[in-house]
Amino acid sequence: MTTGHLDKVALDMTAQAGAEALFKGVPHPKGRKPFPGAICASINDEVVHGIPSETAALKDGDLLSVDFGVRLNGYCGDAAVTVPIGNVAEVNRRLMDVTREVLDIAISMARPGVKWSQVAARMQKHAESAGFSVVRDFVGHGIGTRMHEDPKVPNFVSRDLLEDDILLTEGMVIAVEPMINAGGYGVRTLGNGWTVVTKDGRFSAHFEHTIAIVKGGCEVLTRPR
């Protein structure tokens, strides 16, 4: 199967739901071609913003990360998942599992009154204790009537976060999206202007949910029901 076919499936589902695909046509920050896909389909060392293509055929051993966002009835949802294709190397399967666990940690801790630095510290520690690294150049975000809203929601602790921490409050809606690399956290952008890959060529994994902070905890809005 190609990632272009997956993109068509996503577009068809979006149309059937009466929704709007958020990624398709997003302007490039430096004036290059808008993003062409409804989904981001990132394979192996591609961290985020992989462009779906009819020539990008999936093969045994690949890790595929699919990021997808829509607007429905005026509100946005954003989610990502990494899936193994066929027989995946043990280190890359572990990378996928740990990245999912990092997101689960954030969901388990998210509740009113919690500072995000506490959550991010646990997320970062879990990834690094497994021998992996947390991408620094891309973070989660607030989400509502627009795809990207304040605050920025990092998956690691930085001086900026400690100086301007995020206090979770009831009613906040955030997209939490750990991107974890098997090697170093350094990334670079390919010549197409969109696709971000690991600098060392090691694999990367990406999981994301849109969550609402509610009384006593959080509700995962993008979890299948």
Image (spheres, rainbow, N blue to C red):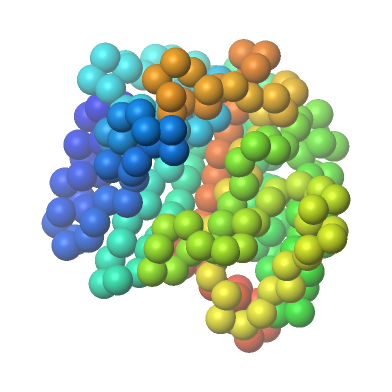
Nearest to the observer: residue 190 or residue 63:
190
Examine the rendering and report whether any part of residue 200 can be seen. Answer: yes
Residue 119 location (% of width, % of height): 77, 60
89 relative to 143 in the view: left or right: right
Residue 107 location (% of width, % of height): 64, 62
In which quadrant will I find the N terminus? top left
As displayed, is residue 110 above or below residue 97? below
As displayed, is residue 131 above or below residue 19? above
Nearest to the observer: residue 134 or residue 94:
134
Query: What residue sits 84% from the left and 60% below the top?
Result: 163
Residue 65 location (% of width, % of height): 47, 34
Examine the rendering and report whether any part of residue 176 can be seen. Answer: no
Query: What residue sits 60% from the left and 28% below the top?
Result: 204
Query: What residue sits 40% from the left and 63% below the top?
Result: 146
Nearest to the observer: residue 211 or residue 160:
160
171 relative to 24 in the view: left or right: right
